[in-house]
Amino acid sequence: METNERAPVETDPNTNPNPNPITAASPLLEDVDELNKVFNGFDTNSDGKISVNELETVLRTLRSDVPQAEELRRVIEDLSADRDGFINLSEFSAFCRSGGTSEGGGDSELRDAFDLYDKDKNGLISTEELHLALERLGMKCSVEECQEMINSVDSDGDGSVDFDEFKQMMTAKSRAFNDSVN
């Protein structure tokens, strides 16, 4: 039946009974896709979870001063709600939604993420810095696409992303992701 082939089918009893307002052209879907891309950039072996080694590899790719293995294990422990020693997509999303704070952790983890992009340490992420970081993560984006990403969160119009804008972006993306899967 051709009409049934086009209709979306939801069989998971845990999904939201309300119709999902996200369409292919929705900016929310782009946010979900971006959150997935970031997660997948960390999850290099595509097993659906981020290990200490994967976290270390990404940090090494983005900067030279990688925390010690014990500190990385503590980060994973703090973020892993099920305490399995890994960060899954749901836990990653919850971390982003919280504004990058784990219990009692303040903004330090989100600040560390911001600093990965802010190579010149001027408190701003420029188009060039974003482009370089994404290239190092193996994500193919043009400078123009990076400028569009910057513009989409640049609330003060200075052409860069400061920490507050970064925090708002990470929180909004995670909320959009969680709304789409609930």
Image (tube, helix red, strand yellow):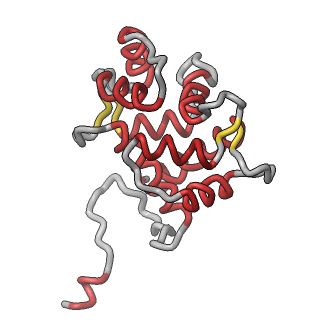
Is 146 or 175 nearer to us in this picture?
146
Q: Residue 22: image x %, image y %?
A: 49, 67
Is 15 or 174 nearer to us in this picture?
174
Q: Residue 136: image x %, image y %?
A: 42, 40
Q: Is residue 171 above or below residue 4?
A: above
Taking the spot 39% from the left edge, 21% from the top edge, the residue there is 76
In the rendered image, which quarter is residue 98 located in? top right
Taking the spot 61% from the left edge, 33% from the top edge, the residue there is 118
- Outermost residue on the left side: it is 1
Is 134 or 38 nearer to us in this picture?
134
Is 136 or 72 nearer to us in this picture?
136
Q: Residue 108: image x %, image y %?
A: 60, 21
In the rendered image, which quarter is residue 143 located in? bottom right
Instruction: Report whether 21 appears left or right of 159.
Output: left
Q: Is residue 161 above or below residue 22?
A: above
Taking the spot 22% from the left edge, 91% from the top edge, the residue there is 2
Instruction: Report whether 123 appears left or right of 92.
Output: right
Taking the spot 64% from the left edge, 38% from the top edge, the residue there is 167
- Outermost residue on the bottom side: it is 2
Instruction: Report whether 148 appears left or right of 30.
Output: right
Q: Is residue 64 above or below residue 58?
A: above
Count of numbered tags? 0
Which quadrant is home to the N terminus? bottom left
